[in-house]
Image (tube, rainbow, N blue to C red):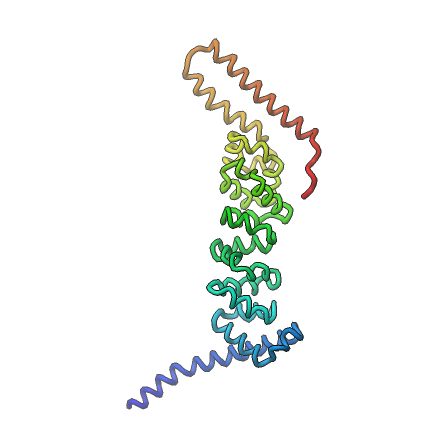
Amino acid sequence: MRRIVVLICLAALGQPAAAYAGITSRAAREAAELVLRKFGKEAEEQGLQTLTQKIESLGLRYGDEAVAAVEKVGPRAFRYVDEAGENGLQSVKLLARYGDDAVWVVSKPNRLALCAKYGDDAAEAMIRQGKIAEPLIASLGKPAAKALKTVSRQNGRRLVMMGEDGTLAAIGRTDELLRVIGKYGDRGMNFIWRNKGALAVATMLTAFLANPEPFIDGTVELTSAAAEGIGAPLAKQIGSRANWTYVLPALAAIVAALLALKLWLRHRAMTMKPAPSI
């Protein structure tokens, strides 16, 4: 009776394992043959049997994506995944998805760590923008990663420049500004780039962040909205006080100053030469 029970347990445990191993071995061998054809001498140094065993071992640890990673970048994948340590799965996923474009990311532990910390947004941003994206993501985190993954390489460079030269810090409310770029992509970044000086004024930044779309679409002017934002609460506050002999001239001076600022900004925009394309 004891022997029968043991045989039943062995059959139950052994049969699926053997079938699974057989499927994995077959897929690993097919992948090894593909790698030999695709990568020539680089793969021939290891030979079909060694490649098959390595692919099977990697596949058992990380699944089908491991096979795809080796098929895309060749035998180098084994080294990259091994050097990634605890971020081995992240390395496999990036190589399987992006192939050679991901090599510069997976080859450095600090870059892989950013991907592990901030997820697919960081990976997509670095693949899209290249090495310039790394410092901004490291300093500003997920909002920067999401912004960088949604814009063109040109606007990615512009955003990085704004981070490096202190413009983002001067404007303030950086996370909110980055979220606008993440939502509107190049349209949002183009507006912010053109108006980065005006946005450093707190009232203009507040008006923009409250409802970015009309400004980005060009249906509302930034200076007009800022003037309205100042005028309404100021008028309410002044109206609750008394001496209109002094109030009215003060209001007139404020309105005149705002109109002068608006005209000056418009004149400056028309007369200044466009900034060179970056």
Looking at the rendering, in which quadrant would you find the C terminus? top right
The quarter in which the N terminus is drawn is bottom left
Please state the horizontal and vertical placement of residue 79, each as a whole percent of the image.
55, 69
Q: Count numbered badges in the picture.
A: 0
Residue 29's image quarter?
bottom right
Point out residue 259 in the picture as x, y percentages from the top left corner: 59, 21
Looking at the image, the residue that sits furthest to the top is 245
Q: Where is residue 198, by image quadrant?
A: top right
Q: Is residue 193 above or below residue 228?
A: below
Residue drawn at x 57%, y 18% as measured from the top left: 256
Q: Identify the residue at the far left of this view.
A: 1
The residue located at (47%, 78%) in the rendering is: 20
Please indicate, yes or no, whether residue 48 appears anywhere in the rendered image. yes
Position of residue 11 in the picture relative to residue 112 (left or right): left
Residue found at x 54% / y 28% = 226
Determine if residue 188 is in view.
Answer: no
Instruction: Please determine whether, in this image, residue 84 is positioned above or below residue 268.
Output: below
Q: Position of residue 109 (x, y in %)?
A: 52, 59
Which sits in the foreground, 141 or 262?
141
User: Looking at the rendering, which quadrant does residue 103 occupy?
Assistant: bottom right
Residue 218 in picture, x, y percent from top left: 61, 35
Relative to the observer, which residue lies in front, 12 or 190? 190
Query: Residue 102, relative to residue 21: is it above or below?
Result: above
- As displayed, is residue 190 above or below residue 44? above
